[in-house]
Image (spheres, rainbow, N blue to C red):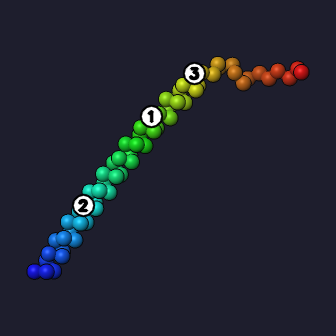
Amino acid sequence: MDITMNIASLSTQISQSNLSQAVDIAMMKKTMETQEASAENLIQMISSAVPPSFGHKIDVRA
């Protein structure tokens, strides 16, 4: 009976660990998606703030 209880306890612990790991991975994926969207928005803001002709000509007269 003692071995059966240990196996059942171990099985429960493994299941809880697997669930916890799955939740952690899901949260990490969601965080990465949010950061990706934020980065895309930042890139759009930066590119729209700079005029298209900026950086194409250099004034070399001093």
Q: Earlier in the sequence, mark 1 or mark 2?
A: 2
Expressed as whole percent of the image width and height from the top left, the position of residue 18 reads: 28, 60
Q: Earlier in the sequence, mark 1 or mark 3?
A: 1
Q: Secondary structure at mark 3?
A: helix
Q: Which residue is mark 1?
A: 37
Q: Quadrant of residue 5?
A: bottom left
Front residue of this view, candidates 12 and 56: 12
Q: Secondary structure at mark 1?
A: helix
Q: Amino acid at mark 3?
A: Ser
Q: Secondary structure at mark 2?
A: helix
Q: CA distance from mark 1 to mark 2?
A: 32 Å
Q: Residues within 10 Å of mark 3 (few under 14, many from 20)?
A: few
Expressed as whole percent of the image width and height from the top left, the position of residue 8 reads: 16, 71
Q: Amino acid at mark 2?
A: Gln
Q: Which mark is residue 61?
A: none
Q: Is residue 14 above or below residue 5?
A: above
Relative placement, left or right, of 52 versus 61 is: left
Q: Which residue is mark 3?
A: 48
Q: Which residue is at the far bottom?
A: 2
Q: Residues within 10 Å of mark 2 (few under 14, many from 20)?
A: few
Q: Which mark is residue 16?
A: 2
